[in-house]
Image (cartoon, grey):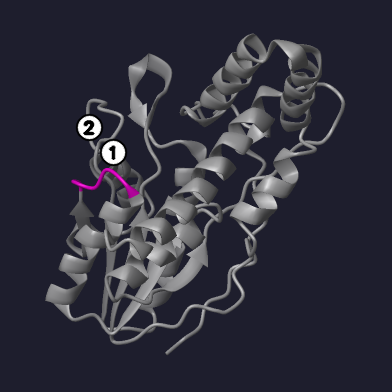
Amino acid sequence: MQPLRRDTKPVDLSRKTYVTPFKLILFTLLALFFAAIVLWKGARRPLAIFTVAFFWLLAAGWLTAPLLRLAQPHWRTEAPATFAPRTAIIMLGGGTIYGAGQVLMPPRDVLARIAASAEYYAACKRAADICHVIVSGGNPQRHRATEADTYLPYLLRRQVPRADIVLENRSLTTYENARNVSGIVHGSRYDSLILITSAYQMPRALLDFHRFGLTPQPMISNAIGARLGVLPRYDNLASAEIALHELIGIAQFHVYRAIGWF
């Protein structure tokens, strides 16, 4: 078996043309703060000051940075990847965006996952008999095509042959990624599993895969960071949204496990 080590550097997506759209977490927090200001008449002034300060700290990066450290505590891959005679490289989806001419394409952090998957595939082929890339991602955004189908041409361009690519295009969540991939993996009897995704998603993804009895090697494709300063930046709010989404997802997983839902 031949190891492969990636010296991954954090990718600051705020410097790129793609900006992650908000979900609902920050909007919900803002709505709650506003409701508290309206209903709690005796504390309107301190609540208003706190709300402005809280969102400024997020937008200026000073609160976003520690949130990201919690969400992606070990963004650098510690151990090299190892390949067995039958190896599966699992790449998780991360949405799709419309580019120029309304062409559906992967966002930038998914492009990093695709690049990492192709690199590990090339190394795997030098060391193992069977190497497959399992691309997992449905269509939670309800765009024209699923994530897996959208990513396929990008893997082909990076010299991953179609015969070695397995598309799982039904998953809508990370939990479903793990559930649906587990069915593929258990049916194919792979000797080694490599999981590729961004640093912020890896902790929650590993919890979900462990839930289905899988212990893949975690290989991080990229990380995101905050840009500290005085002026507020939308990019920092987007990064804070990602961090909060992952942290809440981890808490939700443990609550569901405790009450027997997972």
Q: Is residue 256 above or below residue 209?
A: above
Residue 69: quadrant of the picture: bottom right
Point out residue 122 in the picture as x, y percentages from the top left corner.
40, 69
Q: Is residue 12 above or below residue 210?
A: above
* Inter-mark Cα distance, 1 to 2: 6 Å
Q: Which one is nearer the viewer's eye here, 234 or 221?
A: 234
The reply, left or right, for residue 260 in relation to residue 106 is left
Say the numbered circle drawn on residue 76. Answer: none
Point out residue 146 in the picture as x, y percentages from the top left corner.
24, 37
Mostly what secondary structure, the magenta segment?
loop
Query: Which residue is under mark 2?
Result: 145
Q: Which one is nearer the viewer's eye here, 164 or 178?
A: 178
Q: Which residues are magenta?
A: 169-173
Q: Are marks 1 and 2 in contact (CB under 8 Å)?
A: yes
Say the numbered circle drawn on residue 150. Answer: 1
Q: Amino acid at mark 2?
A: Ala
Q: Secondary structure at mark 2?
A: loop
Question: Residue at image x 66%, y 23%?
Answer: 234
The reply, left or right, for residue 220 in relation to residue 208 is right
Question: Residue at image x 32%, y 69%?
Answer: 211
Q: Using the rendered image of the protein, determine whether residue 115 is visible from the camera's viewpoint.
A: no
Q: Give the residue at the far front of this rendering.
A: 42
Q: Give the residue at the far left of this rendering.
A: 187
